[in-house]
Each structure stands twice: as C-alpha cells, then as structure tokens.
C-alpha cells in the first residue's frame, strides 16, 4: 500500500515538474509544420524568430508534427481554436478551402509574393483568387533521374537522354533485362505501384499531361469527360503497357526509390529532394537528372502537393504572425533557409544563384520551368479525388481491367465527390 | 510410433510459428547495425558488415531526446495501467456483485464503447482537454487512458466467479463494502489485476494517435512519436527507425519476459489477440 502511494506521489510530482515551459511564455508565435525531413529548414524560423523577437518581443517556436496523422492534429487544434498554432504549414486549398481556418494575407505581402514566384507557383497558396499561403517548396515536380552506368551498359548515351515518350520507351526496352521466364530482373523504369492511391496518381499525372489529358475540368467542377477522356485512356493504356505489355516496369519490384538505389531500375521520375536521398542511400549510383520526356505536349512543372505556410484565422497574434512572415519574405532569407537544408529556393531571383547552379538538377529544373504550366488540381477535396483516380490506375497496372471502363468508373466517382 | 511422429510434426509446426514471430525482430535488430548502403545492397545480406556498428543508435539519441521519450512512455504507461486497475476493479465489483435498476443496460452500454473508434471522438476530446488547459501535459496525454473499458469487462468477468457466499459471510462479520472489496475480492482476483496492468501498460506504451494529437513539445513526446519521426512524407530512414525500434521494444520485452505467465493467462481469460 505504501509502495502504491509512493508511486502515485512520485508521478504527480514528476508531472508538475515536467509541465512545458512554453506555457509561461505568452509572447511566442507557435508554428506547426510536418516537414520532419527538413530540420534545418524548420530551425531557420526559430533563428530568424530571435532576430524578429528583438524588434517586436515575439519569438517563434516551431513544433514539428509527424506526417502520419498530422491532419487529425491540425483539424482538432484549428477547430479548438485556443489550442491552435499561429502559423501552420499545409495545403492552402485544404485548410482555407475545405475549412475556413486561414487569415487572408495582407495585400502588400501578397503583392511581394506575386512578384517573386516562378509562374507555375503563382496559384500555389491561393484559394479562389485570394492569397492565403506562402509557397515554400520549389522543385516539387518530377524530373527524370537516370542511372548513367546502366545507360552505358545498354549502349545508350547518358548525356543524351530521351526527349520524347517514344524515344523514352525505346530506351526503357533496351534497359530492361529479362530472365529465362521472361520476367524482368532489371527494369528501365522504376514505377510506383504500391501505397496510397494519391501517390500513385501523383506519379501517373506527368504521363497523363504529356498525352494532353487532364484529371478535372479547368474550373475543377467536373471529372467526366476529363478523367476518362480519350487522351487519358491513351495515357493509362501507355502506362499500364509499361508493366503488362513491354515489361519495362514491374509490380514485383520494391518501392521505386529502392529499385533505383539497388540498380535494378535505370530511370525514376522523382522530385528535386531525391538526389539527396540517392547520395545518402546509394552513393555508388552514378546518376544524372533531366527534364521529363514529352509526348503530345510536355508534362511541365506541376504537383499535387503545393505546400504553403498560412496564418490561423483564430490566432490572437495574427498581426505579429504576418509581420514575421513579412520579415522573412525576401530573397536573402529564401536562399539562406532553403540552402541550409539543401533544397531549392522559391524566389525567382534565386533560381540562378551560385547555389542553385551548383546543383545537379539545375539544368533540368530550368528546362522544366520553360515547359508550359500543366493543369492544377488545387481543389479542397484533391486527396479524395486523387484517391478515386489512383484506384483506377492501380487496377490497370495490376491488369484488373481495361483503362476505359476503369476511368469511366473513376470519373463517375469523382463527380460524386465533387457534388457532395 | 504414430504418437511420436505426431509429436515431431507438432514440434515442427511450433518451431515454424516461432520462427515467423522471431524473424522480424531478428531482422530489425540486424538492420539496426547496418549502414544505409548496406541496407540497399543486393543481394540482400542478412548480417551487417560490422557487428560493432552502433552509429545508428548514436544518431537516434543525437537527433532526438530518446531517453526522455522512454521515460515519458514509462511514466504514462505505468500511471495508466495502475489507474485502470483501480477504476476497473471497483467498477467490475459493482457490476459483478450488485444488482441495481438498468444494471445490464449500463454494463452493455459501457462495453459498447469498445466499438466506437477512437478517431471519431478525438476532436471533442481535444476540445475538452484544451478547455481544461491540459494540452501538452502528462495529465492530458493520460486522460483517455485512466479508465479502461476492456478492464471493466475483464474485472467484472473475474469477480463474478468469486462465490457470493464469501461476500455475504464478510458482510455478516461486519465488514464494510470497501472492506469486502479490499480484503475478500481483490486477493481473489490478483491474476486478473496483474493481467490488466500488463496488458494496459503495453497498449499505452504502443499508443500513437492520441499523443500525436495532444503533444507539442519535444520534451513531452512519448516513444512512439519518437519512432515516427524517422519516417516522413518522402521516405523512411530504415537504419534509424530500426535502431529506435530496438531501443523502444527493450523495456516492453523485459516486461513481457518477466510477466509472461500473467500475459498468457490474460489472453486465455479475455480471448484477446494481437
């Protein structure tokens, strides 16, 4: 009995002692982000927050929320209001479109960002024409990474990457090695076939765009006639043929990143962060980065996940939060913050900086930016829509149906989501 | 002869089952000793190049206050287990030995809570905890775990089989209701209490979702939050996540080995799996 009492008293004392000190510091801007992979980038907010604090008395506290389940935490907190962050990172069309949690960006700051973003990012951070969010990630579009050694082995010149989808398919065939049973032991293309359908959609969209297809109507109100258009059907046929007909990609392979890192796949389409991953995980892979090949049109720099920083409407420190955002909204901070983490800066002025020029994806990024801006799907229900669409792509990859009926079904489902 | 052959077959099946259970743990442990390129290397290699490679463990503790996470988890899981044992045994006693109007409805109402997914109550719970000013505190993390519906069910089942004659005899001897509970009921259901404490400890130790929602400060994180910090939206750091998993599984493994008998009994009593 005495033991139990001792444990209970110890627990209460420990709880009292361990209460976080942040509760005692009212002049703090709380910043939530789920970018766990970018600790240096996140630390920058606190570092510059100290400078900001000397002028205003407000410092910045960064809370890194695990990506798994961050939406539940955001939702609970932003609905709870008083337990919510002042600034938070996420997708504008979700948090400001599906929910009404965001404060409108002051006009002068919105103008600053409008004048300094690459053209494909101009709509990132906007909802219904109004700017709420500050785009924080450039290079979040897929580019073509090739394994130079495997290219050479197949008799291909790694300095002359395929520029069209036809040339690309021909190269993929040369890069694929089949075993005695006709199954690939090495594939030309590392294809994403597992995981959440949203991710599957994300990886398929460059092909769809290269075929001149789009997932939704330009006003984002309709899927039928777009998600199941003749161009989309042709794109999905081409994509599923990579696995089922040409066998230049395989659903038996692990994740595309692992297949590329293990030299079992000669190309992969991935974003600008990927070269850091290859350097760390597969340092003996000699890779080069190029713009994606074009079909009827070029796929261009587009993405499904436009990450931005927003200010919570319910924040009692809204003004200070915007002032802090203004404080770090300049070319120097943009470059310093992104360079610290080894990722691409956002401001156009920085796209030709020495740091960016020294990166292996400099040329490819420039080329991608010269391509036409692909369709955007910044709809509040983009995740649900991409899930419905991705399920059709997965089914086609695994030979569970023909592209046309699968896409018809997906389009109907997407229209229901849009109507609800 | 037939029996001997059957015995061998049984032993082989059990050994195969044991291998299936142990192999993931073994793979996790050896992976935690490999460098990142070793993990990617083909053909896959079972053993690390260097058995003494503890770099991943060092990095886990350098990147995150993992010691603190372990301490937090131990504290939260212990308090939750003890609190659940106290509340559940009292409630179980009430349901097992007292008859009152709506007794059955009330009991099945409580048990029915087991069918409500936690995700569906997380927002109102968060609002409530926020209003109480308990966000990012130990009481906030603990609040939903202080009472266990499963525990109420378990203790009611265990107490019900204690003969009511004992209770009546104690009452005739002048024992108070609490005295009966303390001196007659509790000693008779010690195994069930031990089972509840252990199972609840393990469940709370493994919990991710609620701590994720309610915790903000790095110092308040529990071990599961530390583990997921090595996965992100783009990739999983297998070398670090396996090292962190080894570290986080050791305490629970110790508890399991020390209390194996009770856990097995608990599984039998409750029909519990997983």
Image (cartoon, coloured by chain):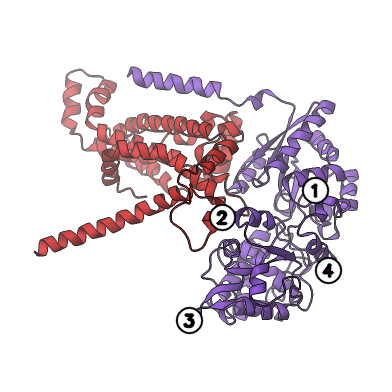
x, y percentage for residue B144?
48, 36
Q: In the image, B263: left or right of A319?
A: left
Decide if residue B53 is on the left or right side of residue A217. left
User: Which of labels 4 and 3 is toward the front?
Assistant: 3
The residue tagged 1 is A132
Q: As displayed, is residue B127 above or below residue A130?
A: above
Q: CA distance from mark 4 to mark 3?
A: 43 Å
**SS assignment at label 4:** loop
Tell me, yes or no, whether the two marked residues, 4 and 3, touch with CB atoms within 8 Å: no
Read off the chain for label 2: B
SS state under label 1: loop
Q: Residue at x 26, y 19 (%)?
A: B176
**Between discs 4 and 1, the one toward the N terminus:** 1
Which one is closest to the eye, mark 4 or mark 1? 4
Quickly name the residue at label 3.
A180
Residue B37, labelled with which disc?
A: 2
The kind of secondary structure element at disc 2 is helix
**Cβ atoms at labels 4 and 1 below 8 Å apart:** no
The quadrant the N terminus of chain A occupies is top left
């Amino acid at each position: 009995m005495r033991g139990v009492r001792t444990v209970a008293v110890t627990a209460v004392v420990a709880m009292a002692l361990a209460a976080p000190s942040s509760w005692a510091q009212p002049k703090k801007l709380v910043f939530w982000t789920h970018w766990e992979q970018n600790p240096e980038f996140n630390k920058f907010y606190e570092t510059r927050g100290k400078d900001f604090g000397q002028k205003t008395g407000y410092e910045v506290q960064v809370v890194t929320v695990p990506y798994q389940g961050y939406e539940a935490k955001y939702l609970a907190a932003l609905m709870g209001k008083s337990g919510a962050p002042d600034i938070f990172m996420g997708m504008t069309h979700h948090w400001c479109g599906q929910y009404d949690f965001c404060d409108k960006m002051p006009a002068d700051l919105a103008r600053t960002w409008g004048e300094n973003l690459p053209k494909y990012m101009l709509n990132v951070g906007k909802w219904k024409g109004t700017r709420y969010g500050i785009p924080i990630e450039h290079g979040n579009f897929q580019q073509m990474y090739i394994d130079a050694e495997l290219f050479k082995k197949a008799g291909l010149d790694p300095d002359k990457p395929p520029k069209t989808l036809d040339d690309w398919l021909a190269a993929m065939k040369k890069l694929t090695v089949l075993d005695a049973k006709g199954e690939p032991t090495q594939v030309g293309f590392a294809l994403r076939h597992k995981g959440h359908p949203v991710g599957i959609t994300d990886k398929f969209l460059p092909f769809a765009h290269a075929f001149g297809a789009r997932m939704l109507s330009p006003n984002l109100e309709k899927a039928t006639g777009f998600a199941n258009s003749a161009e989309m059907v042709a794109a999905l046929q081409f994509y599923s043929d990579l696995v089922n007909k040409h066998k230049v990609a395989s659903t038996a392979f692990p994740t595309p990143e692992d297949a590329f890192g293990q030299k079992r796949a000669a190309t992969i389409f991935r974003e600008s962060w990927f070269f850091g991953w290859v350097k760390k995980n597969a340092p003996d892979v000699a890779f080069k980065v190029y713009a994606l090949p074009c079909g009827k049109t070029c796929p261009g720099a587009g993405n499904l996940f436009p990450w931005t920083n927003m200010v919570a409407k319910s924040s009692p420190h809204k003004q200070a939060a915007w002032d802090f955002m203004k404080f770090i909204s300049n070319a120097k901070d943009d470059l310093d913050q992104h360079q610290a983490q080894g990722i691409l800066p956002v401001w156009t002025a920085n796209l030709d900086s020495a740091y960016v020029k020294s990166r292996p994806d400099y040329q490819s990024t420039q080329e991608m930016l010269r391509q036409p801006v692909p369709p955007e799907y910044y709809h509040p229900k983009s995740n649900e829509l991409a899930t419905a669409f991705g399920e059709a792509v997965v089914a086609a990859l695994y030979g569970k149906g023909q592209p046309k009926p699968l896409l018809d079904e997906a389009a109907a489902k997407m229209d229901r989501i849009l109507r609800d | 002869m037939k029996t001997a052959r059957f015995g061998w077959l049984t032993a082989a099946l059990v050994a195969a089952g044991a291998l299936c259970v142990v192999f993931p743990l073994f793979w996790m442990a050896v992976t935690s000793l490999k460098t990142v390129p070793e993990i990617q290397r083909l053909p896959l290699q079972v053993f690390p190049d260097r058995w003494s490679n503890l770099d991943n463990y060092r990095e886990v503790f350098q990147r995150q206050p993992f010691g603190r996470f372990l301490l937090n988890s131990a504290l939260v899981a212990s308090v939750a287990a003890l609190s659940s044992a106290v509340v559940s045994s009292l409630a179980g006693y009430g349901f097992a030995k007292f008859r009152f109007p709506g007794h059955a409805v009330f009991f099945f109402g409580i048990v029915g809570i087991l069918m409500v997914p936690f995700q569906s109550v997380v927002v109102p719970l968060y609002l409530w905890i926020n209003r109480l000013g308990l966000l990012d505190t130990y009481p906030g993390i603990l609040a939903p775990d202080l009472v266990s519906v499963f525990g109420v069910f378990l203790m009611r089942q265990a107490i019900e089989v204690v003969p009511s004659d004992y209770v009546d005899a104690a009452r005739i001897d002048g024992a108070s209701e609490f005295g009966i509970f303390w001196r007659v009921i509790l000693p008779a259901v010690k195994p069930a209490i031990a089972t509840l404490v252990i199972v609840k400890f393990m469940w709370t130790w493994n919990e991710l979702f609620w701590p994720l929602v309610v915790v903000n400060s790095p110092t308040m994180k529990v071990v599961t939050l530390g583990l997921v910090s090595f996965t992100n939206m783009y990739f999983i750091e297998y070398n670090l996540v396996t090292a962190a998993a080894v570290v986080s599984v050791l305490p629970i493994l110790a508890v399991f080995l020390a209390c194996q008998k009770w856990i097995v009994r608990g599984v039998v009593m409750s029909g519990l799996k997983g």
